[in-house]
Amino acid sequence: MSEGSYPHLPAPPPTVVPETEQFWAATAKGTLLLPQCAACATIIWYPKGICTGCGSLDIGWTEASGEGEIYTFSISRRGEGDYREAGPFVLAYVELDEGPRVMTNIVGCSPESVRIGLRVRAVFDDTGEGTALVRFAPSER
């Protein structure tokens, strides 16, 4: 089964603002780029211009491994908006190896095979507008 083939999820383009521009540009290249505080080294999720650890405005960017594990998840059987016809899909929090927990979708496997602790890796679904949505697929087979 190819990544993203089960289930097929829509990839609506995100709203890009100055604080997230570098993040979204990196996703289009298949890279998970995360903000990191220069003062305290906190890796920040969701990208923003202020450190959630110490309040510093001295924020840089670091390339993440794209690896992590499922912290918790839910199988959604009915979506709304762009997800109305998506069928069952997994909404999960993935704890990245770098620390932050990211809300995302799990793709590349059946929803019934997802479990807490499952190792996953980032995959990127092109939105067609110069960005890609970061989703995760199982990394152990």
Image: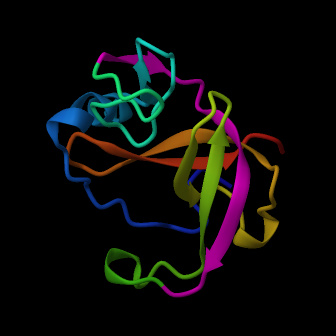
Note whether 63 is above or below 93 in the view shown: above
Q: In the visual, does 61 lie left or right of 140? A: left
Task: Indicate the quadrant where residue 75 lies.
Answer: bottom right
Q: Quadrant of the C terminus?
A: top right
Residue name at image x 33 percent, y 32 percent: 23
Is residue 31 visible to us here? Answer: no
Residue 58 spot, x, y in % from top left? 30, 16
- Residue that extends furthest to the bottom in the rendered view of this protein: 78
Q: How is the image coloured?
A: rainbow
* Depicted 108 relative to depicted 48: above or below: below
Residue located at (19% from left, 45% from top): 16
Per the rendered image, the range of residues in magenta is: 58-78
Q: x, y (%) of residue 136? A: 59, 48
Find out whether residue 52 is within the magenta segment: no
Residue 78 located left or right of residue 125: right
Residue furthest to the left in view is 18
Please indicate whether residue 38 sits to the left or right of residue 111 in the image.
Answer: left
Q: How many marks?
A: 0
> Is most of the magenta stretch helix, strand or loop?
strand
Query: Quick one: which residue is furthest to the front in this view?
Result: 54
The residue drawn where x is 42% and y is 12% is 39
In this view of the protein, can residue 110 be seen by the observer? Answer: yes
**68 falls in the magenta region:** yes
Question: In this orientation, which residue lies closer to the viewer: 106 or 7?
Answer: 106
* The N terminus: image quadrant: bottom right
Q: Quadrant of residue 111?
A: bottom right
Specify whether 48 is left or right of 75: left
Residue 46, x across and y down, in percent: 40, 43
**Percent position (x, y) of residue 98?**
62, 27
Residue at x-position 34% and y-position 22%: 56
